[in-house]
Image (spheres, grey):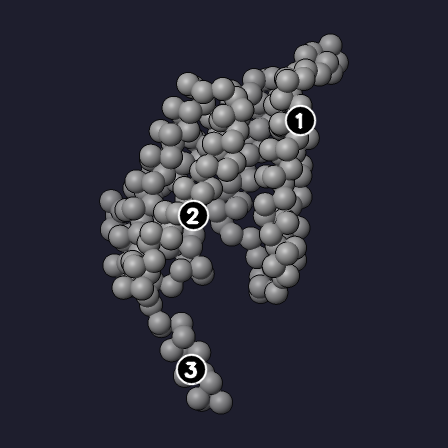
């Protein structure tokens, strides 16, 4: 697919709107319970059921409008559907709380396998966003792998020891901020190991014309 320009406002709504809506809906219905087909469901399970299609539609719409979907978005959407669907089907919100752990651990293990093979599989996911030389990708991959392992541990610690509300805020607000801060701290790495090869190719093509 060829990428298409998309207004920043619409892109932001599609990326963050479902998450914000999920948090607000949870805060409204967290203390409620709902009976469906003689089965009682907690507010969290009902909100999960309501927002599963919202997440999928948002990602599909973003992909349709831009002409591309990041591989990490596809993987995350699959995890959300699997664990969210099981949480609703089995009426057990604990499965949804384990979802972030599963995502972080899966990514960390996959990246670790790549590192053992002397490869940066993170490059495969993020190459279009961050142009780095091979050494830069290897360093960043090691740091991101550690971040994912620590994130998995943090999620397990929070959901098992804190209230449900604290966990929801942690995963939807605190963790995105932590990941953002992490990548901001890597600016020095990006500067030291930036790859200008794509830009050089474009200049050559332009001069050839």
In the picture, the disc for residue 203 is 3
Element class at badge 3? helix
Q: Residue beneath label 2, please? A: 180
Question: Element type at marker 2?
Answer: helix
Q: Which is in the foreground here, disc 2 or disc 3?
A: 2
Which of discs 1 and 3 lies nearer the camera? The answer is 1
- Quadrant location of residue 32? top right
Residue for point 52% across, 21% down: 164
Residue placed under numbered mark 1 in the picture: 28
Image mark for residue 71:
none
Q: Position of residue 201 (x, y in %)?
A: 40, 77
Residue 30 in view:
yes
| Res 27 → quadrant | top right
Q: Residue at x 40, y 75 (%)?
A: 199
Q: Residue at x 30, y 59 (%)?
A: 188
Residue 178 at x, y = what percent?
41, 41
């Amino acid at each position: 697919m060829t990428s298409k320009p998309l207004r920043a406002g619409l892109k932001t709504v599609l990326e963050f709107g479902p998450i914000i809506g999920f948090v607000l809906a949870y805060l409204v219905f967290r203390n409620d319970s709902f009976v469906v087909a003689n089965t009682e469901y907690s507010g969290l399970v009902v909100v999960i059921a309501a927002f599963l299609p919202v997440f999928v539609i948002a990602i599909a719409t973003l992909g349709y409008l831009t002409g591309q979907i990041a591989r990490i978005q596809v993987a995350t959407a699959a995890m959300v559907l699997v664990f969210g669907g099981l949480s609703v089907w089995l009426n057990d919100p604990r499965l949804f709380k384990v979802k972030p752990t599963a995502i972080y651990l899966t990514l960390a293990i996959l990246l670790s396998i790549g590192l053992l093979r002397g490869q940066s599989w993170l490059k495969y996911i993020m190459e279009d966003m961050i142009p780095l030389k091979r050494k830069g990708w290897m360093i960043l991959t090691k740091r991101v792998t550690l971040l994912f392992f620590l994130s998995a541990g943090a999620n397990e610690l929070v959901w098992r020891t804190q209230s449900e509300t604290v966990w929801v805020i942690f995963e939807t607000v605190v963790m995105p901020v932590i990941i953002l801060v992490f990548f901001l701290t890597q600016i020095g790495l990006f500067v030291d190991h930036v790859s200008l090869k794509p830009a050089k190719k474009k200049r050559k093509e332009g001069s050839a014309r």
